[in-house]
Image: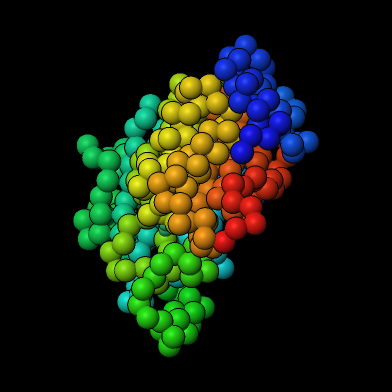
C-alpha cells in the first residue's frame, strides 16, 4: 500500500543527504529539525530510561554510557515484568535474561540465558570490554559475571511467581508468543560527538522453554549499530525478528537512503512476507531506528507499539502499523 505520505517519504529518501530533514511524517513533533544529542527507546518504560540516558548525554557523555545506564532503569524495576529483575520466569519457573550492547566502532557484547544477575546489560558491556568474544551464555556467562564482581541474586519476585503459578494451572506448555507478557527495552542514542550506540535487554517471552534465547541478545536481530549510517532495535516475537535478521535489515535500508521510519516499515514488510500467517494472529513485531543525523522513526505489524524520544524534551510517540483490520 502506498499512501501519499509514504510516497513522498520514499521519493525524498534518496535526497536524504541533500536535505537537512527528509522526514515528512504525520506526527507534528517529528517535523522539527533533528537534534543532537538524542535518545530513543521502546515502550512506556523507555521514558524513565531515557531520563537516565539524558543525564549522561546532556553533559557531553558518550552514547555508550547513556544506553547502558538508561536500560538499567527497567532492568532494576520489579514492576517491569518483561526486563531484568522481576521478569516473568520460563515455563520451569526460572528467570533467565538476554541482553546485548554495541558501540560506535561496531564492537559488541552479549549475554544469553543468564540467570541470577539483575543487570545483564552491564555484563554484556563487560563481555565487550574484557573478553575477546562477543557472546557468553548460561553458566559461563554467570561465572564470568561473578568473576567481574556482579552479585548473585534471586530475580523471581512474588508477583511474577504468582503469575507463573496461575499460568501453570491452565497451560499446555506451549509458549507461542501470544501470552501477554513480553516487551523488551531497546535503546539507541546519538551523542554530542555524533556517535551512535545501542542496547537491548529482556527477560524474553513469558513461560518460554528453559534455555530459549531472544532476538534481544543477538547482534543484527534485536540490535544493530553502524556508526556510518544509523542504528535499530527490534521488539515483539523474537523468533520472527531472528528469522529475517530484523535490525540489520533496518540499518541496511537506511544505508540505501530510507528515512528511519520507512526503513522500519521495510523490515516489518520483510517479516510479514516471510510469514504471511502473522497477519492472522495477534502477535506483534516492531522496530525503532535512529540515523546518523538524529532522525528517528518506528513501525510495527499491528497497532500498539509506542516509543519514547528524548531530545530537548522526553515524550512518547505511537508507531504506524502495517496490518489494519485483520487478525
Ligand atoms: N523480543 C523479545 C523476545 O522475543 C520480546 C519482546 O520484545 O516483546 O523475547
Q: Position of residue 170 (x, y in %)?
A: 44, 85
Residue furthest toward the bottom? 169
Residue 155, by quadrant, is bottom left
Up-down relation of residue 295 to residue 202 (above or below):
above
State the residue at coordinates (29%, 69%): 210
User: Quadrant for ligand 1?
Assistant: bottom left
User: Is the C terminus in the top left, top right, bottom left or bottom right quadrant?
Assistant: bottom right
Q: Answer yes or no: is residue 4 visible.
A: yes
In this view of the protein, which residue sits in the foreground, 296 or 179? 179
Residue 54, by quadrant, is top right
Looking at the image, what colour scheme do you see?
rainbow
In this view of the protein, which residue sits in the foreground, 83 or 298? 298
Up-down relation of residue 1 to residue 75 (above or below):
above
Q: Position of residue 304 (x, y in %)?
A: 63, 55
State the residue at coordinates (66%, 15%): 19
State the residue at coordinates (61%, 47%): 321
Q: Answer yes or no: is residue 57 visible.
A: no
User: Is the N terminus in the top left, top right, bottom left or bottom right quadrant?
Assistant: top right
In this view of the protein, which residue sits in the foreground, 278 or 119? 278
| Number of numbered discs | 0
State the residue at coordinates (49%, 79%): 163
Amino acid at each position: 500500500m502506498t499512501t501519499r505520505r509514504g510516497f513522498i517519504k520514499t521519493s525524498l529518501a534518496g535526497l536524504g543527504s541533500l536535505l537537512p530533514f527528509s522526514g515528512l511524517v504525520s506526527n507534528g513533533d517529528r517535523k522539527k529539525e533533528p537534534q543532537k544529542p538524542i535518545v530513543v527507546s521502546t515502550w512506556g518504560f523507555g521514558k524513565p530510561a531515557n531520563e537516565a540516558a539524558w543525564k549522561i548525554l546532556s553533559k557531553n557523555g558518550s552514547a555508550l554510557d547513556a544506553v547502558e545506564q538508561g536500560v538499567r532503569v527497567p532492568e532494576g524495576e520489579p514492576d517491569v515484568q518483561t526486563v531484568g529483575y522481576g521478569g516473568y520466569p520460563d515455563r520451569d519457573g526460572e528467570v533467565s535474561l538476554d541482553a546485548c550492547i554495541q558501540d560506535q566502532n561496531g564492537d559488541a557484547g552479549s549475554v544469553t540465558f543468564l540467570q541470577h544477575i539483575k543487570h545483564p546489560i552491564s555484563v554484556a558491556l563487560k563481555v565487550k570490554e574484557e573478553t575477546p568474544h562477543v557472546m557468553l551464555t548460561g553458566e559461563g556467562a554467570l561465572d564470568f559475571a561473578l568473576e567481574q564482581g556482579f552479585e548473585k541474586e534471586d530475580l523471581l519476585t512474588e508477583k511474577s511467581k504468582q503469575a507463573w503459578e496461575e499460568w501453570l494451572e491452565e497451560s499446555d506448555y506451549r509458549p507461542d508468543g501470544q501470552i501477554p507478557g513480553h516487551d523488551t527495552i531497546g535503546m539507541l542514542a546519538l551523542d554530542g560527538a555524533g556517535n551512535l550506540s545501542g542496547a537491548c535487554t529482556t527477560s524474553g517471552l513469558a513461560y518460554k522453554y528453559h534455555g530459549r534465547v531472544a532476538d534481544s541478545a543477538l547482534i543484527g536481530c534485536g540490535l544493530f549499530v553502524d556508526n556510518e549510517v544509523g542504528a535499530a532495535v527490534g521488539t515483539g516475537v523474537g523468533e520472527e525478528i531472528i528469522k529475517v535478521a530484523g535490525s540489520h535489515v533496518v540499518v541496511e535500508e537506511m544505508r540505501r537512503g530510507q528515512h528511519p521510519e520507512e526503513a522500519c516499515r521495510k523490515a516489518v514488510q520483510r517479516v510479514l512476507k516471510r510469514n504471511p500467517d502473522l497477519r492472522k494472529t495477534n502477535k506483534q513485531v516492531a522496530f525503532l531506528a535512529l540515523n546518523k543525523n538524529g532522525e528517528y522513526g518506528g513501525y510495527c505489524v499491528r497497532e500498539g507499539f509506542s516509543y519514547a524520544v528524548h531530545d530537548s524534551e522526553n515524550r512518547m510517540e505511537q508507531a504506524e502499523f502495517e496490518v489494519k483490520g485483520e487478525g
